Amino acid sequence: MSAANSPPDTLYKEMGLVRIVEIDPVGRATLEYMATAEQSHSGGVVQGGFVTGWIDAAMAHAVLGIPGLDAVPMTLEIKVTFFAPTRPGLVVAEAWVVQSGRRTAFVEGSLKDSAGVLLAKASSTMTLASRAKVEAASKAALA
């Protein structure tokens, strides 16, 4: 399944999403982001929260690509290892589902620069929350 042409929502715009390259039904996803100077701190290095968010979003998309799964993946735990500074420019977040059950998914992901240099890697445990319950709670909170 390719969502490369789907329009980004506000969160995607805030995160700097360029495009969703691929969401594969085997539990893989690839997303491209534009890291900017505004996301950087001293020395022109992108703040680690953006790096973590990009990988986390790719991991959620990898889970969402699993056929027949009507759940919202919510991160319970995430561990990120930073290998090199992320600088402004195009970055690629890739993720893959290691194992998934009815209520929990174990997912890994990475962030690379446009030259393929590994910048960071992450692993995550996600709960698979009922989409109906999540949406009902969201509507109730907005009412």
Image (cartoon, grey):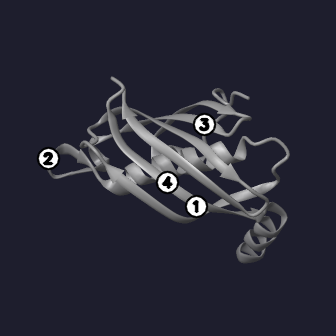
Q: Nearer the viewer, mark 4 or mark 3?
A: 4
Q: Which mark is residue 125?
A: 1
Amino acid tagged 1: Thr
Instruction: State the CA–CA distance, disc 2 to disc 1.
Output: 32 Å
Q: Position of residue 128 (x, y in %)?
A: 72, 61
For the residue carrying disc 2, how many other residues have a C-alpha within 10 Å: few (<14), some (14-19), or many (20+)? Answer: few
Which tag, 4 or 2, sits closer to the chain's start? 2
Which tag, 2 or 1, sits closer to the chain's start? 2
Q: Position of residue 143 (x, y in %)?
A: 76, 76
Q: Is residue 136 left or right of residue 89?
A: right
Which tag, 4 or 3, sits closer to the chain's start? 3
Disc 2 target residue: 43
Q: Is residue 81 left or right of residue 67?
A: left
Q: Position of residue 116 (x, y in %)?
A: 36, 26
Which residue is the extreme one toward the left?
43
- Say what secondary structure mark 1 lies in: strand
Residue at the (28%, 44%) spot, across then down: 83
Instruction: State the CA–CA distance, disc 4 to disc 1.
Output: 7 Å
Q: Which mark is residue 123?
A: 4
